[in-house]
């Protein structure tokens, strides 16, 4: 008897995304996977739009930050016994059409975190955001003790082995870095990246991510983790290797 197929769900945290959320959720539903939307205290039409769709909608009465929205979604996924959660932002920068390639990468690298890495059409990234992402990649890879492409992407597949890290003491955008670092250093979880397009042009609203405030928070947290785990020189050397990049759409994989 063959093993049961993994049970996946899609998790979309959102805040004031009335312009894009209907399309984002609708395209996610077309994949035939359960969808969980966590509304982080929106004061526009976002919850009204989502509530009309066949998804699980969880709401925060007040804004708690992206980290808490992800926690709420992880707890719901654990309650339903899903084997993995695929996260994507609600502003339209992530496409549901990239998810099948991420699922294929997960089948090839079971138990690994899969990141939708914005490696294609990078010229669309604003220069300030590109520099901020480069700094974050450098530091978080060091803290993880391995090279990771696009540590700031919100489109990720989290295997069940990482979902119970829900109570890590990290808030806002730092939570995503905390899960990566802890999963790598304490769980031995692998990380692979699937190339996706950088999408910054069009009708996107201004990002909730602040290159100064949030990069500063992530930097201080990351430095603390490097000190905590020790072996800083060895970890740095490992982080200078090439990240694992999997391009399932071309039915091949490369180590870059």
Image (cartoon, helix red, strand yellow):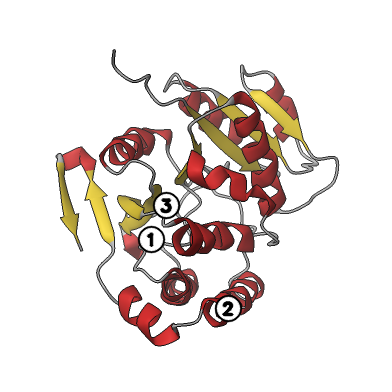
Real-space Cα separation, disc 3 to disc 1, in angstroms: 7 Å
Please rate how many residues cluster around mark 3, counting C-alpha atoms within 10 Å: few if below 14, some from 14 to 19, many from 20: some
According to the picture, the residue beneath numbered tag 3 turns out to be 199
Residue 89 in view here:
no
Residue 95: percent from the left, percent from the top?
Answer: 42, 39
Please rate how many residues cluster around mark 2, counting C-alpha atoms within 10 Å: few if below 14, some from 14 to 19, many from 20: few
Quarter of the C terminus within the rendering: bottom left
Q: Which mark sits nearer the N-terminus, 3 or 1? A: 1
Residue 48: give its label.
none
According to the picture, the residue beneath numbered tag 2 turns out to be 228
Real-space Cα separation, disc 1 to disc 2, in angstroms: 36 Å
Mark 2 or 3: the one toward you: 2
Q: Identify which residue is drawn at 36% across, 68% down.
A: 146
Real-space Cα separation, disc 2 to disc 3, in angstroms: 35 Å
Q: Identify which residue is drawn at 61% across, 16% down.
A: 54
Q: Quadrant of residue 238?
A: bottom left
Q: Which mark sits nearer the N-terminus, 1 or 2? A: 1
Q: Secondary structure at mark 3?
A: loop
According to the picture, the residue beneath numbered tag 1 turns out to be 124
Residue 1: percent from the left, percent from the top?
Answer: 29, 12
Q: Nearer the viewer, residue 69 or 143?
A: 143
Q: Quadrant of residue 218?
A: bottom right
Q: Quadrant of residue 223?
A: bottom right
Q: Identify which residue is drawn at 30% across, 51% down.
A: 195
Q: Secondary structure at mark 2?
A: helix
Q: Look at the numbered discs 3 and 1 and tell me whether their residues touch, using CB distance below 8 Å.
A: yes
């Amino acid at each position: 008897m063959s093993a049961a197929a993994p049970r996946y769900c899609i998790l979309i945290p959102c805040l004031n995304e009335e312009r894009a959320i209907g399309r984002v959720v609708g395209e996610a539903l077309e994949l035939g996977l359960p969808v969980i939307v966590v509304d982080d205290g929106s004061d526009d039409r976002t919850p009204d739009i989502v509530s009309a769709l066949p998804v699980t909608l969880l709401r925060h009465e007040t804004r708690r930050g992206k980290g808490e929205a992800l926690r709420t979604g992880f707890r719901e996924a654990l309650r339903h016994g899903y084997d993995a959660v695929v996260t994507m932002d609600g502003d339209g920068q992530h496409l549901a059409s990239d998810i099948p390639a991420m699922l294929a990468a997960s089948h090839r690298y079971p138990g690994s975190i899969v990141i939708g890495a914005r490696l294609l059409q990078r010229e669309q990234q604003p220069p300030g955001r590109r520099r901020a992402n480069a700094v974050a990649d450098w530091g978080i890879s060091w803290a993880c003790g391995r090279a990771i492409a696009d540590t700031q992407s919100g489109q990720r597949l989290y295997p069940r082995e990482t979902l119970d890290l829900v109570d890590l003491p990290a808030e806002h955008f730092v939570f995503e870095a905390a899960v990566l670092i802890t999963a790598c250093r304490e769980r031995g979880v692998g990380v692979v990246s699937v190339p996706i397009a950088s999408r910054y042009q069009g009708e996107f609203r201004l990002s909730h991510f602040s290159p100064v405030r949030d990069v500063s928070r992530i930097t201080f947290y990351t430095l603390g983790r490097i000190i905590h785990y020790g072996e800083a020189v060895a970890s740095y050397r490992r982080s200078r290797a090439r990240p694992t990049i999997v391009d399932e759409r071309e039915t091949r994989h490369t180590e870059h």
